[in-house]
Image (tube, rainbow, N blue to C red):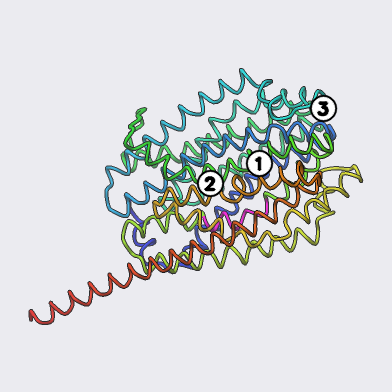
Amino acid sequence: MGKSDEMFEKESIGKLLFRFSIPIIISLLISELYNMVDTLFVGRSVGNHGIGALVLVFPIQRMIIALSVMIAIGTATNFSRSNGKKDLEKSREIVQNGFSFGYLLMITITAIVFIFKEQILMALGASEEILPYAKDYLGTIIFGSTFLSLTIFISNIMISLGNNKVAIASNSIGALTNIVLDYILVVRGNMGVKGAAIATTSSQIAGFIFAYYVYSKVKKKYEISTGFKINKNIIVPIILVGVSAFIVEAEDGIVMAVLNNLLISTVGDTGIVVLGVISKIYMFLFITMFGIASAMQPIAAYNVGAKNYKRLKALMNKTAIYATLTSTVLWGISMIFTPQLISLFVKDTNIIKESVKAFRIMVSLFPLISIYYVSIFYFQAMGKARTSIMVSILRQIIIMIPMSVILVKVFDLGAIGVWLSYPISDILSSITSYILIKNEETELDTRIEKQMKKKRTINSELKYSH
């Protein structure tokens, strides 16, 4: 759909990945600051109960982000594929339907969560001490959900059009707003978790205003209708392509909810606080592998539509290499400076000591999972929804959750059982993904050979016709 065609078809893969991944990585980095900044200010101003409240609300936040990413990536991938086929009318319909669906879904979720917030928090394991803080936080931040979701949507569509600056700019505006308001409301205004929630919601609205301003110009340029439209034949493919991305994002929330309940039954609120602190650092380790894999997706989807399988194979291999190398660097830094990183969030020496031990166990095999996440994004781009979904649920849903329950409940390992479930699931899921990727390479080799054979036949016929 314009200038992105030649870039996706001809530009150096390494250069293309670098061009797309750097803005996404920066955007992801800034996005993680939203929740991290709240935890930092709340942890130092309110204390352990404040951190506990943010940890309890995290699964809900993650579920909202997961649904947003599902719609955004599902729409952007189908959009890129239609562009590869030069079907511009279909591309316009896909964007219009995706935006409408995202808006309708988030408005509905906001109403449900606000009405039933106490029941939801109790189901997530809230203690009597933490519940009031969690209600204050959730009751406010839920109103920013629609703005956050549509910002994610717009950012992904703009990336598919070759504009990767909107995500950075909108997230930067949001993050800066969040930091300033957190300081004013939490530190100076002594408003606690309520102030942190107001800061987060305000920052999401600010980011959306900028993103939509840019998006409105793009809609006009490409003649994308502004009307509300829901077409089942377009929405279903969006969901099917995006559902694996939903699982990847939602898994963190589901796992956190399960682990919260396991920890509170063994070590109490202390376990929840430790999990909350180390999860902030843990999420940062995913930034480069997610950024590079996300950058691959629109490029891969375009070349699938264009049937350029040779370029597709090279893209997959380089993405896996770059993701592994960069995540290994981040992993090394986090392992060396674990105490210093954790002490940013809490002052309690006992919490710091337990968090350092837990974190180092949790991430001991972390670099291995780069291939796992690259495979998920690759299968999404290929339109292999079933494979992508199965791989997506493998690491955390199929392996980690049962493993953590077994280690805690059956072997009675307590909190250590929770931390050990991470490296065990990392190695098992990575081995499976590696096998699937090697099989995919064989399939691509077959397609490449068929294309080359067909090309030789055509050239031979042309030669003899002259």
Provide residue 466's location: percent of width, then percent of height: 7, 81
Kind of residue at disc 3: Asn
Task: Name the residue carrying label 1.
Answer: 255
Residue at the outermost left position: 465
What type is the residue that disc 2 sits on?
Ala
Residues drawn in magenta: 284-293
The secondary structure type at the circle numbered 3 is: loop
Q: Position of residue 297 (x, y in %)?
A: 46, 55
Q: Give whichever of discs 3 and 1 has the lower sequence position.
A: 3
Q: Residue at x 42, y 34 (%)?
A: 99
Q: Which mark is residue 190?
A: 3
Q: Nearer the viewer, mark 2 or mark 1?
A: 1
| Alpha carbon distance from label 2 to label 3 | 32 Å
Residue at 67% x, 49% y: name it.
Answer: 283
Is 290 included in the stretch rendered in magenta? yes
Q: Nearer the viewer, residue 246 or 263?
A: 263
Q: Nearer the viewer, residue 289 or 384?
A: 384
| Residue tagged 2 | 167
**Residue type beneath disc 1:** Val
Find numbered disc 2 in the image and state the secondary structure of the residue it sits on. Answer: helix
Q: Earlier in the sequence, mark 2 or mark 3?
A: 2
